[in-house]
Amino acid sequence: GEDVEQSLFLSVREGDSSVINCTYTDSSSTYLYWYKQEPGAGLQLLTYIFSNMDMKQDQRLTVLLNKKDKHLSLRIADTQTGDSAIYFCAEAAPGNTPLVFGKGTRLSVIA
Amino acid sequence: DGGITQSPKYLFRKEGQNVTLSCEQNLNHDAMYWYRQDPGQGLRLIYYSQIVNDFQKGDIAEGYSVSREKKESFPLTVTSAQKNPTAFYLCASTIGVGSPRGAFFGQGTRLTVV
């Protein structure tokens, strides 16, 4: 079955790098996503990575994918207070099935 | 600008009443979804629809109902059978189920039972 696991909390100091981790169980997943949710709002797509890629970089964001271990990570460089939010990992299995989301990691940035 | 609009942002319901949450999109997406979010529970799928006049149950469909009469609209009714309806409800859409472009979300409706 499909299941996506994330740690629930992460706290970092402003200016440091943040690394949010995610593990998934469906080895046939085609795409993996990172979403950001600010308080009281919907989810915003940050980035995604295709399953045949190892890494994707987009400005301060770096996504690493280890297919062997079914491990996905999101690194945020130079973390700012505006990065404080809940970050969700999600996977898309092949075929017409909805995305499966993790429970989210709450990132707190300390000034 | 294209997007997903959920209304109302806040909704209060008395016990025993049915309420309907609105979700409208102008992205021309075929697939639409309803999720429920509780603290520490992440997102749980209630219902989804791949095409007009068709929908499927998600993981927690009991006590909810939906309709998909128009491509743009996917309203969710929370019925009196839903025993614990207080939650944050999120609507989303994708070009198609399994689309690599991921899901677009509305801003959510917070439902409180009083």
Image (cartoon, helix red, strand yellow):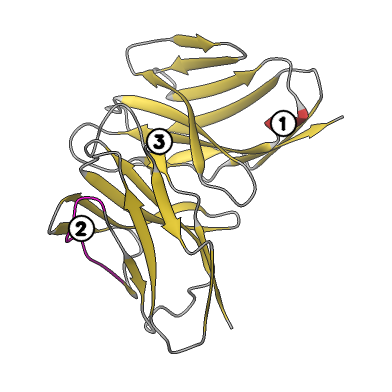
Marks 3 and 1 belong to one chain: no
- Cα distance between the residues tagged 3 and 1: 24 Å
| Front disc: 3 or 1 | 3
Q: Which mark is residue B1?
A: 3
Which type of secondary structure does the marked residue at label 3 adopt? loop
Task: Examine the rendering and report whether any part of residue A1 can be seen.
Answer: no
Is residue B100 on the magenta stretch? Answer: no
Look at the image and tell me in which quarter the N terminus of chain B lies: top left
Q: Is residue B79 left or right of residue B51?
A: right
Q: Establish if A47 lies above or below A4.
A: above
Q: Which residue in the rendered view is the most extreme toward the left? A: B53
Q: Which residue in the rendered view is the most extreme toward the right? A: A111
Task: Examine the rendering and report whether any part of residue A16 can be seen.
Answer: yes
> Magenta residues, as a range?
B65-72
Q: Amino acid at mark 1?
A: Gly
Q: Which residue is pictured at 43% across the width and 10% down the height?
A: A54
Q: Establish if A32 lies above or below A107.
A: above
Q: Residues within 10 Å of mark 2 (few under 14, many from 20)?
A: few
Q: Which residue is pictured at 27% across the width and 33% down the height?
A: A93
Q: Amino acid at mark 2?
A: Gln
| Front disc: 1 or 2 | 1
Q: Which residue is pictured at 39% across the width and 39% down the height?
A: B104
Q: Is residue B96 left or right of residue B92?
A: left
Chain bearing mark 3: B
Q: Which residue is pictured at 32% across the width and 27% down the height?
A: B101
Marks 2 and 3 belong to one chain: yes
Chain bearing mark 1: A
Q: Residues within 10 Å of mark 3 (few under 14, many from 20)?
A: few
Look at the image and tell me in which quarter the C terminus of chain B lies: bottom right
Determine which residue is flagged by label 2.
B56
